[in-house]
Image (cartoon, grey):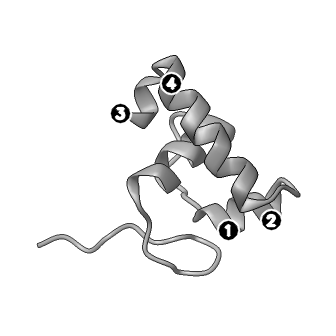
């Protein structure tokens, strides 16, 4: 069993949406990932805004959020 990916900043285990949002907002090729909380803090947003954006990206058919 492989170790789950963890947030590079706080060490929290990451979900698929955390990885997808990091790739969407930072770089599709990144290997450094953030949890939604740290990503929101980095971009001075709220987690709720990021969750809404995830819904929008998913509805638009963005392949990162499948």
Residue that appears at 44% across and 66% down? 14
Q: Residues within 10 Å of mark 1 (few under 14, many from 20)?
A: some
Q: N-terminal of the two: label 3 or label 4?
A: 4
Residue 31 against residue 39 in the figure, above or below: above
Return the residue at label 1.
37
Distance from the alpha carbon under mark 3 to that under mark 1: 21 Å
Measure the alpha-carbon separation of dots 3 and 4. 10 Å
What kind of element bears circle 4?
helix
Mark 1 and mark 4: Cα distance apart in space: 22 Å
Which of the 4 image quarters holds residue 48? Answer: bottom right
- Mark 3 or mark 2, which has the lower sequence index? 2
Question: How many labels were placed on the picture?
Answer: 4
Mark 3 sits on what residue?
Answer: 66
Residue in the image at 54% along x and 57% along y = 32
Give the quadrant of residue 56: top right
Q: Are marks 3 and 2 in contact (CB under 8 Å)?
A: no
Looking at the image, the residue that sits furthest to the top is: 60
Quarter of the figure with the C terminus: top left
Q: Residue 27: tell me if it is visible.
A: no
Which quarter of the figure has residue 10? bottom right
Left or right of 33: which side holds 6? left
- First in sequence: mark 1 or mark 4? 1
Secondary structure found at label 3: loop
Which residue does the numbered mark 4 point to in the structure image?
59
Left or right position of 47 against 32:
right
Which-is-in-front pick, marks 3 and 2? 3
Q: CA distance from mark 2 to mark 1?
A: 6 Å
Q: Secondary structure at mark 1?
A: helix
Along the line of sight, which residue is nearer the eye, 52 or 2?
52
The numbered mark, 3 or 1, whose residue comes first in the sequence reads 1
């Amino acid at each position: 069993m492989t170790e789950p990916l963890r947030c590079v900043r706080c060490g929290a285990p990451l979900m698929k949406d955390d990885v997808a949002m990091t790739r969407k907002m930072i770089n599709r090729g990144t290997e450094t990932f953030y949890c939604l909380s740290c990503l929101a803090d980095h971009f001075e947003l709220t987690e709720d805004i990021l969750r809404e954006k995830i819904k929008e990206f998913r509805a638009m058919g963005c392949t990162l959020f499948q």
